[in-house]
Image (cartoon, rainbow, N blue to C red):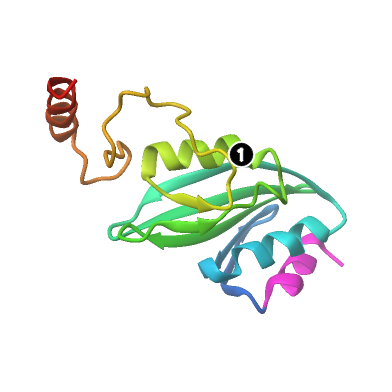
């Protein structure tokens, strides 16, 4: 069985959409409630190489996280969206310890909280960075960020 067919058969119940735009590339959209279940299934498949990265994208009222997983010779991108108003997802650090730094980065830059993550301390932004300012969200323009930083420094 082809690897993409195996992955598709394993995640068909959790997937909202599966797209294979070309050979060795696969996108799977899932609901946030199915993130851990889907990751466990992928981890359990023989041939999983590694979690390459987790990326974030501001898509309006949501933040989309894309978990890039290398499986044999296929790059599988597991997509999940979370609302900006309640940006909480379960951690996968207990399943893939190397996800710790990626989750901290996403927390810093997009404000997504990972429930169960043992360390969401700042990774990229300085400790003096104003709370609630997430520089990769579209509503935070450079001008707004500068104003908030100036206000924050005046309070010290």
Residue lying at the far front in this picture: please name it: 156
On screen, residue 11 above or below 100: below
Q: Residues within 10 Å of mark 1 (few under 14, many from 20)?
A: some
Q: Position of residue 145 (x, y in %)?
A: 19, 32
Q: Position of residue 52 (x, y in %)?
A: 65, 40
Q: Residue 129 or 51: which is nearer the viewer? A: 129
Q: Position of residue 97 (x, y in %)?
A: 70, 41
Q: Which residue is mark 1?
A: 100
Which element is circle 1 on? helix
Identify the residue at horizontal 48%, vertical 28% (top origin): 123
Residue lying at the far bottom in this picture: please name it: 13
Q: Which of the 4 image quadrants contains residue 33?
A: bottom right
Q: Residue 149 or 39: which is nearer the viewer? A: 149
**Residue 104 in the figure: left or right of residue 85:** right
- Magenta stretch: give its range: 1-12
Task: Please tell me whether residue 152 belongs to the stretch shown in magenta.
Answer: no
Q: Image quadrant for the C terminus? A: top left
Q: Residue 2 or 144: which is nearer the viewer? A: 144
On screen, residue 138 above or below 6: above
Identify the residue at horizontal 61%, vertical 39% (top origin): 100
């Amino acid at each position: 069985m082809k690897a993409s067919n195996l992955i598709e058969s394993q995640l068909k119940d959790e997937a909202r959409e599966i797209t294979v735009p070309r050979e060795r590339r696969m996108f799977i959209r899932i609901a946030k409630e199915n993130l851990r279940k889907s990751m466990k299934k992928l981890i359990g498949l023989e041939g999983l190489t590694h979690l390459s990265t987790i990326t974030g994208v501001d898509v309006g009222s949501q933040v989309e996280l894309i978990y890039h997983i290398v499986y044999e010779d296929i790059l599988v991108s597991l997509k999940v969206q979370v609302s900006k108003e309640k940006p909480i997802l379960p951690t996968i650090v207990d399943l893939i310890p190397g996800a710790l730094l990626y989750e901290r980065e996403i927390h810093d830059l997009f404000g997504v909280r990972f429930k169960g993550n043992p360390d969401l301390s700042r990774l990229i932004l300085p400790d003096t960075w104003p709370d609630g300012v997430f520089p990769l969200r579209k509503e935070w323009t450079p001008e707004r960020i500068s104003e908030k930083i100036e206000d924050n420094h005046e309070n010290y």
